């Protein structure tokens, strides 16, 4: 498993857990739902087969606490949640478990479901994992700005999206680093694997543009149309997403019309093509290019550095955990505005 390491000092004497947490993780017996015996003070492991699972946690302890939960390949599943001393708080979410657990072309990861406890003072009183009977999927098709990044400081916005969703709505992130519309359709580990998994009623978000650097306009349009048709053939609902901007500023503080706004080497305005296909095919559009452009320009050259990995890697394309979380919030808000998910299915704030 590749999970975020809890912050230094996060697991202290103030973290009050039952004695079982000091023992190695146990396995569930007799068909009973696995519980707290599967956990240590910082992590839980459940030997479950691939599938979709509902997870219910009780947070809190004798002292005041603040707990976040990540899972599988550094996926944010529950935002940091504070609980007063002596109280308990129940939260639930739905998680996708599969192999490979992160990027579709990456390593398999650890079989089963892995959770990691984080936050400033984590306290887990109980946990239950059960098969999800009626979960709706949000399937993500995209590139490195969307995917479950295996290592810090990188994070894709799809990696942060699950923390905004409540029980009954899961994210199956099939975004993969380095992919274009051309390579995603051609690789059997990608489109040929994802399409059969689409179920009637599933949302399938498509953000592919960053690596279509030499794709001509006609090919790019046909590739998007192929994905839309293929999603609909399975009963899914396609949602086209324009790409997040790159952090390249002009002298006047606006973003560069070429590199930053995803005009490729052939002069193709990729976000404009996505918008055009969305209109022609009657597909919902999340205009993440326009939204991230407005945000990054409002922050300016200095404050926008924290959204990307400029300070760490001199990287103006890939986002930090903070930036990915902010961008995932924009996607959540767009799905709500388009009425693609009900208000009760998401966490706001």
Image (cartoon, rainbow, N blue to C red):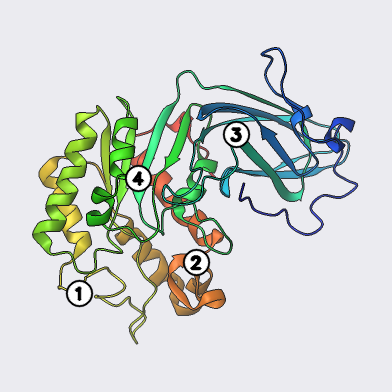
CA separation in Å, label 2 and label 4: 30 Å
Label 4 residue SS: loop
Q: Which residue is mark 3?
A: 112
Instruction: Tell me how far mark 3 sits from mark 2, CA to CA.
Output: 32 Å
Total numbered labels placed on residues in the image: 4
- Which numbered tag is attached to residue 265? 1
Give the residue at x 71% y 21%. 28
Give me the C-alpha separation between circle 3 and circle 1: 43 Å
Q: Earlier in the sequence, mark 2 or mark 4?
A: 4
Of the residues under marks 4 and 1, which one precedes in the sequence?
Answer: 4
- Nearest the viewer among 166 and 188 is 188
Q: Are marks 3 and 2 in contact (CB under 8 Å)?
A: no
Q: From mark 4 to mark 1, how far is it between C-alphas?
A: 27 Å
Crowding at mark 1 (Cα within 10 Å: few <14, some 14-19, many 20+): some
Q: Is residue 35 left or right of residue 130?
A: right
Camera-nearest label, 3 or 2: 3
278 relative position to 107: left or right: left
Question: Is residue 93 shown above or below 261?
Answer: above
User: Of the numbered discs in the image, which one, if any, rests on residue 307?
Assistant: 2
Q: Which mark is residue 2?
A: none
The numbered mark, 3 or 1, whose residue comes first in the sequence reads: 3
Q: Looking at the picture, how far across and down is residue 347, in whole percent?
A: 53, 38
Q: Are the residues flagged by discs 1 and 2 in contact, CB closer than 8 Å? A: no
Q: Residue at x 68, y 30 (%)?
A: 57
Crowding at dot 3, Cα within 10 Å, few <14 / some 14-19 / many 20+, comes out as some
Mark 3 or mark 4: name the one nearer the start of the chain: 3
Disc ID at residue 189: 4
């Amino acid at each position: 498993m590749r999970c975020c390491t809890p912050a230094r000092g996060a697991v202290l004497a103030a973290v009050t857990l039952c004695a079982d947490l000091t023992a190695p993780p146990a396995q569930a017996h007799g068909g009973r739902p696995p519980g707290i015996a599967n956990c240590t003070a910082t992590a839980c492991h459940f030997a479950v087969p691939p599938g979709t699972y509902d997870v219910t946690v009780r947070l809190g302890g004798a002292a005041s606490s603040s707990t976040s939960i990540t899972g599988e390949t550094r996926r944010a599943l529950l935002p940091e949640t504070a609980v007063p001393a002596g109280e308990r708080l129940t939260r639930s979410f739905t998680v996708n478990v599969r192999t490979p657990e992160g990027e579709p072309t990456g390593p398999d990861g650890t079989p089963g479901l892995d959770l990691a406890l984080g936050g400033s003072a984590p306290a887990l009183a109980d946990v239950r994992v059960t098969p999800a009977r009626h979960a709706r999927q949000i399937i993500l098709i995209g590139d490195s700005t969307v995917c479950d990044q295996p290592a810090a400081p990188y994070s894709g916005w799809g990696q942060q999206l699950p923390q905004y969703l409540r029980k009954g709505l899961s994210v199956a992130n099939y975004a993969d680093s380095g992919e274009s519309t051309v390579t995603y359709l051609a690789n059997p580990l990608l489109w040929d694997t994802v399409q059969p998994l689409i179920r009637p009623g599933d949302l399938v978000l498509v953000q592919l543009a960053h690596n279509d650097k030499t794709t001509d306009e006609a090919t790019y349009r046909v590739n998007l149309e192929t994905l839309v048709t293929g999603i609909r053939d399975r009963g899914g609902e396609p949602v086209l997403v324009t790409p997040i901007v790159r952090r390249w500023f002009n002298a006047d503080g606006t973003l560069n019309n070429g590199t930053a706004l995803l005009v490729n080497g052939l002069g193709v305005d990729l976000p404009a093509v996505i918008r055009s296909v969305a209109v022609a095919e009657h597909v919902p559009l999340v205009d993440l290019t326009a939204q991230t452009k407005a945000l990054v320009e409002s922050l300016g050259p200095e404050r926008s550095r924290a959204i990307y990995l400029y300070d760490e890697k001199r990287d103006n394309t890939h986002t930090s955990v903070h930036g990915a979380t902010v961008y995932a919030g924009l996607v959540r808000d767009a799905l709500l505005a388009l009425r693609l998910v009900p208000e009760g299915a998401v966490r706001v704030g």
